[in-house]
Image (cartoon, helix red, strand yellow):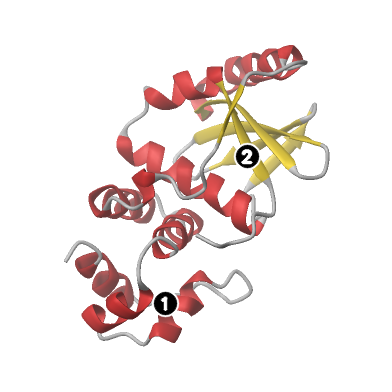
Amino acid sequence: MDLYLKLQVLRSQEFNEWFECQTETVQSLVLARLHRISVDGHFGTTNHFDGLIELKWKSGLRVYTARIGQMVIVVVGGGNKNGQNKDIQKAKKVLNKLKAPLLVVHDPFSKELVDPKRVKEAVLQALVDGDLESVRDVLIAHLRTVNKSKLATKTKLGRQTLYDLMDSEKEFNPSIKTLTLILDNIAA
C-alpha cells in the first residue's frame, strides 16, 4: 500500500489485551476506525477530556486514545458505555505510565480488514446498530485492500462509485442495493 499515513497509531499492551478478548466483529469495527485515523486523520464520533480522546460507537463501544505530539496517536484502552467510568480511570493510568512506552505499531492495513467474512459481519452489525459511520469505516478500510477494478466488474458498479464511497470529502449515502452488491461480491 502506497498511502500516506496522516497519523501514526500505536497500541499499548493493555489495549492489545483488551482487544484480543473482543469478538471478531468488535475487533473489525475498532480496526476500521483506527485505519481511518491513520490514513485520513478522521476520528469519527469522539469526546475529549483529561488528555484522552474517547472514540464512540452507537453500540456503546468505547476506545480510549491520546495524542502525543502532532503525528502520534496512542490507543490506551477500551470498554463499553456500561463500564465507562472504570474504563476511563484505567485508560488514564495507562497513559500516565507511558513515559518510556513499549507500544505496538498499529498496521492500518490489518489482515483482519481483508477477511470478507469479518468485513460482512462488522458492516451488518453496524447497520443493526444504526451506525452509518462505522459502516463507512469498515467499507473504506476493506476497499483500500482490494482491487477496485475487479470488484467493480463483479458488482457491475462503476469504479468511480467505489472510489466515491472511499472519499472522505463526499457524503456517504450508498443505496441498499450498492451495499448489497458490495457485500455479496467481496468474497466471490
Whether residue 44 is visible:
no
Tell how many labels. Answer: 2
Residue at 60% over, 56% down: 39
**Label 1 SS:** helix
Quadrant that contains the C terminus? bottom left
- In the rendered view, would you say 93 is above or below 147? above
Residue at 25% over, 70% down: 180
**Label 2 SS:** strand
Instruction: Please say if the residues under marks 1 and 2 sit with CB atoms less than 8 Å apart.
Output: no
Residue furthest to the right in view is: 69
Q: Which of the 4 image quarters holds residue 51?
A: top right
The foreground one among 95 and 107 is 107
Q: Which of the 4 image quarters holds residue 142?
A: bottom left
Whether residue 149 is visible:
yes
Residue neighbourhood size for the residue with mark 1, other residues' Cα within 10 Å, grouped as few (<14), some (14–19), many (≥20): many
- In the rendered view, would you say 46 is above or below 150? above
Q: Nearer the viewer, mark 1 or mark 2?
A: 2
Provide residue 42's location: percent of width, then percent of height. 64, 55
Q: Amino acid at mark 2?
A: Val
**Residue, disc 1:** 162
**Residue, disc 2:** 9
Provide residue 130's location: percent of width, then percent of height. 42, 55
Residue neighbourhood size for the residue with mark 2, other residues' Cα within 10 Å, grouped as few (<14), some (14–19), many (≥20): many
Q: Amino acid at mark 1?
A: Leu
